[in-house]
Amino acid sequence: MLGEINPFLKGWRKGLRSVALIYPNRYVGGISNIGLQYIYAEINSRDDFICERFYIDVFNGLRSVESGRSLKDFDIALFSLQYEEDYFRAVKILKESGFKGLKIAGGPCCMLNPKPILRFFDAFVIGEVESSNIIDTILEAKSKDDLVGIEGIYTGFEDKVKRIKPKKLDFHLRQQIVGEGAYGRCILLEVGRGCVRRCRFCVVRQIYSPPRWRDIRLLLDVAENYRGVVNKVALIAPSVSDHPKVKELIARLVDMGFMVSPSSIRADTVDDELMELLVTGGLRSFTIAPEAGSEKLRDILNKDINEEDVLNAAKIAREKGIGSIKLYFMIGLPTETDDDIRELIDLVRKVKNIVPRVSVSINPLVPKPHTPFQWLPYTGFKDVRKGMKELNRRSKIIKRGLSKIADISIEKVEDFALQTILSRGDEEVGDLIDIGRPTLKTAEKLGFLKYLEEIPADKELPWDFIDHGYKKDRLIEEYEKVW
């Protein structure tokens, strides 16, 4: 039905324990997740287990892709929660399916703060499962009690949970399912994990530390298995161009006949050689994330790129034949004023003078757990209601300033307020999730707008029980530099 290459089909037989691997979002995102592919292959490699996949846009997430079996017929359900908005779909699947087995969630949202969804699952995996015995432990478990006190697992009874992680990325999944995913029809090469940068708003440097890179010999060896099977490779990492041998890797993949699609490229790493390689590898549009329009705000973000980096990257891209650039920005940053918004508009106009087509994506900042910004008020205003009005006003200024020169996508301030509540909330926020698709007005009636407000730096946080290996005092020092 999905036209997949290399699907892993395992026949059902008596005595098999069944595992449902659920991505409560669209197929294009799920098939592009290398972590899910790893877990799927790992479980199906075991004689006594069968694992099948579920996506929200295939049978509404209630029946499996492989056999069409109902979720309620499976013994264990493993959910991957990549985005807070997925909570609503995950709970909807659980309710509508009638599933009664063991319910376990993992993914970045669980590594940040599982408290808002604690009531809906038996346990949460905190970390990266490779090189651990977590999968074995989960598969052997008959009930929640079997998972209490296990390293890397949170059931609600543990005072502290230390994130698990492989020290080195000296392996890579070889048997992949190829479908029409976020990067097109391709194989996935995860070139690294974590990030060497120190952006204050970003969770990656905290929950995937330390930064780790894969040896390109391993990556090329995996790619070799797919020559003649697919013609495209997606390179996956928070910042692909920070890999110490990225140019050699791309050049070798191009020589092997592959098109190459990087998940992200830092503007300050772009030079003629890198762009030439990317264009030769099939790049036709380019994405840059300045995050803010002014140098002042980029310094506050600790983004470590300047306007010259952005414009230089655009010039090089245009010289190499790229005619389309997408720019990502945030609003609602600490100390942001209308002057910063005007500088955002000016930067887009400068890029537009270089390339023919420009699209702009703008999101309100969500102050995420485990980052130096985790204590900030949503919108950057101490009076959050006033701040939301201001962000809506600033969004209109951006639309007026750019509507004639760029395609603009601005996310709703109210939607990202809900995301902030889901991200920073405690167990009581489960009441909001239980409703289904609540509005911000619903959250206000439940008294949850308090999760949008500034948090005192000395207050205990719902996610403090998770040990990601950093010192909280260091985050406070970073926070005090900007607020």
Image (cartoon, helix red, strand yellow):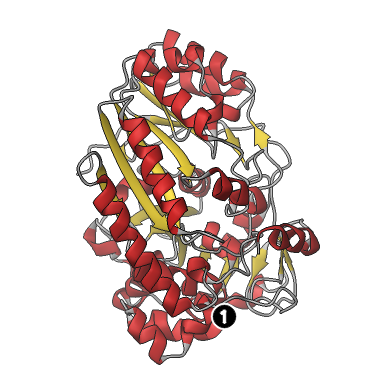
Please state which amino acid type lies under the numbered disc 1: Asp
Quadrant of the drawing holding the C terminus: bottom right
Can you see residue 185?
A: no
Where residue 243 sits: x, y (%)?
Answer: 61, 27
Q: Please give left or right for residue 431 compared with residue 268 in the image.
A: left
Residue drawn 68% across and 77% down? 456
Where residue 310 sits: x, y (%)?
Answer: 47, 31
- Foreground residue, 430 or 120? 430
Q: Is residue 14 above or below residue 271?
A: below
Can you see residue 222?
A: yes
Quadrant of the drawing holding the N terminus: top left
Where residue 283 sits: x, y (%)?
Answer: 35, 22
Residue drawn 39% across and 20% down? 317
Q: Please give left or right for residue 1 compared with residue 167 in the image.
A: left
Q: Is residue 66 above or below residue 472?
A: above
Determine which residue is flagged by label 1: 426
Where residue 105 sits: x, y (%)?
Answer: 51, 65
Q: Is residue 120 above or below residue 20?
A: below
Residue 134 lies in quadrant = bottom right
Residue drawn 65% across and 31% down? 213
Q: Residue furthest top?
A: 255
Q: Please give left or right for residue 452 compared with residue 461 in the image.
A: left
